[in-house]
Amino acid sequence: MTYVLSRAQLEDLPPMIELEAALFGSDAWPPELMVAEVSYPESYYLVAREHGRDEILGYGGLRAARREAWQGDIQTLAVVPEHRRTGLGRILLRGLLAEASARGVNDVFLEVRADNDAAVALYESEGFQSIDRRVGYYQPDGVDAIVMRLQSLSPQPGWAVADE
């Protein structure tokens, strides 16, 4: 299967908002926050589609200054259940890390639910290390967040992003 990544556009927001609610349930960002986040000048959001198809299968977001940033944050990473364990999450993550590197980022941070073993394993396999725990961070579920950091960012080959 071939996935195509592209920079998220405003017209991508309605399906992204639907996916956010479906995938994250009580943890989902409200629509107005997603609109603000994707529109924010320092944000970089990618959407993933299967080659030749219009349906969004995943998305991810980075927040970092556009130039000479020393740190950045992965804001979100989401993949529809049918495309998990296909490498799509890794492709999206690497696309975000490539942009972070282009912006001069050295350290990338993220928070992940402590009960999301698959996501923790993905991040660890890409070099992220746990540095803190935020007790009860995810509400209303009261699930802890693991804070992770990737130091000395060096992008991995094997991805491409289309800016259309």
Image (cartoon, helix red, strand yellow):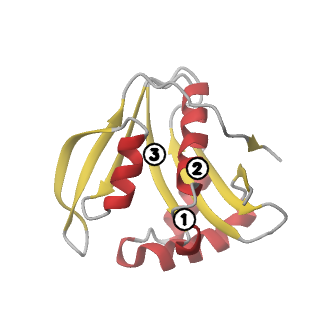
Q: Which residue is mark 2?
A: 92
Judged left or right of residue 119, residue 11 is right
Query: Which element is circle 3 on?
Result: strand
Q: Which residue is mark 3?
A: 74
Check if mark 3's residue and mark 1's residue have beta carbons within 8 Å: no
Badge 2 amino acid: Leu
Check if mark 2's residue and mark 3's residue have beta carbons within 8 Å: no
Question: Residue 50's image quarter?
Answer: bottom right
* Towards the viewer: 18 or 131: 131
Judged left or right of residue 70, residue 79 is right
Residue at 18%, 53% in the rendered image: 134
* Towards the viewer: 50 or 102: 50
Badge 1 amino acid: Val
Estimate the x, y position of residue 75 in percent, counting from the top left: 45, 51
Badge 3 amino acid: Ile
Vertical order, 5 against 155 (above or below): below
In front: mark 2 or mark 3? Answer: 2
Quarter of the image with the N terminus is: bottom right
Please tell me which of labels 2 and 3 falls first in the chain.
3
Local crowd at mark 3 within 10 Å, few (<14), some, or many (≥20)?
many
Residue at 60%, 48% in the rendered image: 91
Label number found at residue 94: none
Estimate the x, y position of residue 22 in percent, counting from the top left: 50, 79
Q: Which residue is mark 1?
A: 79
